[in-house]
Image (cartoon, rainbow, N blue to C red):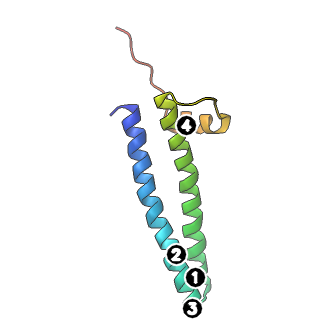
């Protein structure tokens, strides 16, 4: 699988997971409004924290995708470091 295809697969998988987590957050919020409780509140915080972490990782994936396509005007050091960690560039071997 080429680097760009792998990045795009991560992007679409992450987007689908973000939709599921957002739906879980809303359903937990509705359950909390109906019957407030510590366990329901913990579920809201867990789903919201996972959603925010996923959105941050999607920012890195989109940055890596734009870098692979060559559309970046300037480098973002923090995103560049994480993109290099998750999607290292492989130099083609010369024969």
Q: Which residue is mark 2?
A: 26
Residues at circles 2 and 3 in contact by the CB criterion of under 8 Å: no
Q: Position of residue 94 (x, y in %)?
A: 38, 10
Looking at the picture, does residue 92 appear above or below residue 39? Answer: above
Mark 4 crowdedness (10 Å alpha carbons): few <14, some 14-19, many ≥20: many
Q: Position of residue 32 (x, y in %)?
A: 57, 85
Q: Residue furthest top?
A: 95
* 12 on left or right of 86: left
Mark 4 vs mark 1, foreground winner is 4
Q: Nearer the viewer, residue 71 or 2?
A: 71
Q: Which residue is mark 3?
A: 35
Among numbered discs 2 and 1, the one appearing first in the sequence: 2
In the picture, which quadrant includes the C terminus? Answer: top left
* 29 on left or right of 13: right
Residue at point 61%, 71% (across, down): 45
Mark 2 vs mark 3, foreground winner is 2
Q: Which residue is mark 4?
A: 83
Q: Give the Cα separation between the discs numbered 1 and 3.
A: 11 Å
């Amino acid at each position: 699988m080429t680097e760009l295809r792998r990045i795009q697969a991560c992007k679409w998988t992450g987007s689908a997971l973000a939709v599921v987590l957002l739906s879980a957050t809303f359903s937990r919020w509705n359950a909390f409004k109906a019957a407030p409780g510590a366990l329901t509140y913990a579920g809201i915080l867990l789903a919201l924290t996972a959603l925010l972490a996923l959105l941050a990782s999607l920012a890195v994936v989109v940055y890596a995708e734009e870098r692979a396509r060559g559309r970046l005007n300037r480098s973002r050091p923090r995103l560049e470091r994480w993109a290099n960690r998750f999607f290292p560039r492989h130099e083609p071997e010369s024969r």
